[in-house]
Image (tube, grey):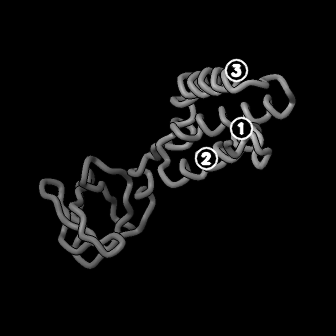
Amino acid sequence: MDILSLGVLSYSVMWAILGIVLIVAELMTMAFVLVFFGLGSLLTAFLTWVGITPDFTSQLLVFSISSSGMLLMLRTFAKKQFFRRADVSQEFVGQKVKVIKAISVNSEGAVSYRGSEWIAFSDSNEVIPAGSMAEIIGTEGIRVKVRKIT
């Protein structure tokens, strides 16, 4: 005798528990795989509860097709929605920084931003002396482009 034949757990409850466990596991991994199997399991639980899939074979078929279908169709879309890459370089633009090594037209200097030293350069023809304030107007790789604040 198994648990299901005793009536302790129905198939719909079993599928619902599996779905919830898979979705919670997805929250820990963030791989965007388990969530689709969890949703497929919840769909199977609902269809079993309603009576559309009374036998275990049809339940496995619904679970397999719905989970695989959602995985193939929605995973790429979901990853793009949740893991958008922000343009980090734009975070710097407009920030005020202290010049710690003079910046001239032909040579790079350095600025202090958020406690770190950054290589800095300027397109202007004026020298930005150490100790003065500048504003970040762009980035190029790991260097920041600055202009003197007047």
121 versus 114 height, above or below = above
Relative side of 117 to 150, left or right: left
Q: CA distance from mark 1 to mark 2?
A: 10 Å
The disc at residue 132 is none
* Residue 97 x %, y %: 35, 70
- Residue at the extreme bottom of the image, as rendered: 131
Report which residue position mark 2 lands on: 23
The answer to whether residue 70 is left or right of residue 131 is right
Q: Secondary structure at mark 2?
A: helix
| Residue at image point 66% right, 48% down | 20
Q: Which mark is residue 42?
A: 1
Q: Secondary structure at mark 1?
A: helix
Q: Vertically, is 150 above or below 91?
A: below
User: What residue is rendered at 12% in x and 57% in y?
Assistant: 107
- The extreme front residue here reads 1
Residues at discs 1 and 2 in contact (Cβ within 8 Å):
yes
Question: Farthest residue in the left direction?
Answer: 107
Instruction: Choose between 109 and 68: the one closer to the eye.
Output: 68
Which callout, 2 or 3, points to the residue nearer the camera? 3
Q: Quadrant of the C terminus?
A: bottom left
| Secondary structure type for disc 3 | helix
In the displayed structure, does residue 30 sit left or right of residue 14?
left
Q: From the viewer's perspective, is residue 134 above or below residue 2?
A: below
Identify the mark nearer the N-term, 1 or 2.
2
Label 2: few (<14), some (14–19) or many (≥20) C-alpha neighbours in 10 Å: many
Distance (Cα) linking label 3 and label 1: 14 Å
Q: Which amino acid type corresponds to the residue marked 2 in the rendered image?
A: Ile
Give the residue pinned by disc 3: 58
